[in-house]
Image (spheres, rainbow, N blue to C red):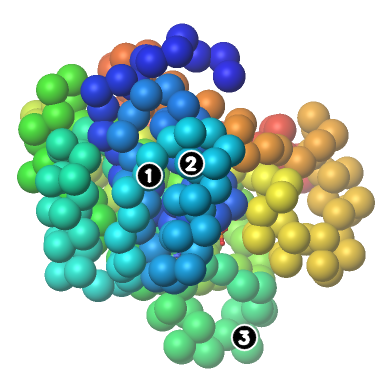
Amino acid sequence: MSFAPGILEGKSAVVTGGATGIGAHIVRMLGSLGANVGIVSRKESNLIAAANAFKTDNDIDVKWQVGDVRDPEAMKAVMTSFAEELGNIDILICNAAGNFICPTEDLSWNGWRTVIEIDLNGTFNCCQAALPYLKEASDGGRIVSISATAANFGWPGAAHAGAAKSGIQNLMKTLAVEWGSYGIRANYVSPGPIEGTEGVDRLIIAQGKSEQVLERIPLGTFGEGKDIANAIVFLASESGKYISGAELAIDGASQWVR
Ligand code: NAP
């Protein structure tokens, strides 16, 4: 770890979708640096297994709540419970998402709507639900949402995710402006392909596309979960205090290859 030990001591963070993949890397990093962390997602079994692993592997006690980010009332209840359990919510990481590859001409209304509801509407629901607590954060509340560099361009086969992630980018810029007077910083991190995740395993490796994708990454490798977690800590800690409405792309420069 490349940050000073304890730099997030006294901070409380909620990570949506924090039981798996990139979210779990973020939880480990925030918890290891001293933050109290809560995770929320739909599957209780995921949450219990992750909480046990965080304790066994990293000696981090993580609070968890079952909840669907698509449900605004449920998210209000979840954020209120976390604020009580954790002491407040100083940092909100909107990471929960769904995606699948489908040409737009074959994409069903239900498929389109589901991804928009989880990724974009879910991010809105969580930001609004956490707002009363983020306003109370002593050094200014921090929101970091996870977008994707693919959403900065056309994303063939992922019109739903591309539209949702682009929407998240503008939502963060708008919240940076609207909620700046509350001291809240709203930014987004845009990963390229990150190894060891459901996204890369299912959408790239299982489709036999690894070599093709790696050829288009100037740094020559997939990213790692800790690369995203490092960016989150930078934005959520004292280092990021004057950064709001910004994108931090973590993709080995792959977005610039055409
Ligand atoms: P992942 O392991 O599939 O994580 C997604 C998480 O979201 C799961 O823990 C899931 O938990 C939760 N979730 C899904 N729908 C939900 C809902 N309706 N309500 C609450 N929680 C829900 O995926 P990942 O690959 O680590 O991706 C993490 C983030 O990075 C996503 O925002 C993704 O778009 C972004 N990203 C990933 C990559 C990559 O290479 N992997 C690249 C670019 C961007 P439950 O099933 O328990 O609900």
Disc with the residue nearer the chain's start (3 vs 2): 2
Q: Which residue is tagged 1?
A: 62
Residue lying at 56% horizontally and 68% vertically, measured from the top left: 99
Residues under labels 1 and 2: Cα distance? 8 Å
- Crowding around mark 2 (Cα neighbors within 10 Å: few <14, some 14 to 19, many 20+) is few
Mark 3: secondary structure:
helix
User: Could you tell me the amino acid type at mark 2?
Assistant: Lys
Identify the residue position indicated by label 2 in the image.
Answer: 55
Q: Position of residue 19 (x, y in %)?
A: 49, 54
Question: Residue at horizontal 75%, vertical 60%?
Answer: 201
Quadrant including the N terminus? top right
Q: Amino acid at mark 3?
A: Glu
- The tag on residue 105 is 3
Label 2 sits on a secondary structure element that is: helix
**In x, y percent, where is residue 38?**
32, 47
Residue at the top extreme, as displayed = 4
Q: Nearer the viewer, mark 3 or mark 1?
A: 1
Depth check, front residue: 159 or 237: 237
Task: Mark 3 vs mark 2: give the one in front.
Answer: 2
Residue at mark 3 to residue at mark 2: CA–CA distance: 46 Å
Q: Local crowd at mark 1 within 10 Å, few (<14), some, or many (≥20)?
A: many
Lower sequence index among marks 1 and 2:
2
Q: Quadrant of residue 41?
A: bottom left
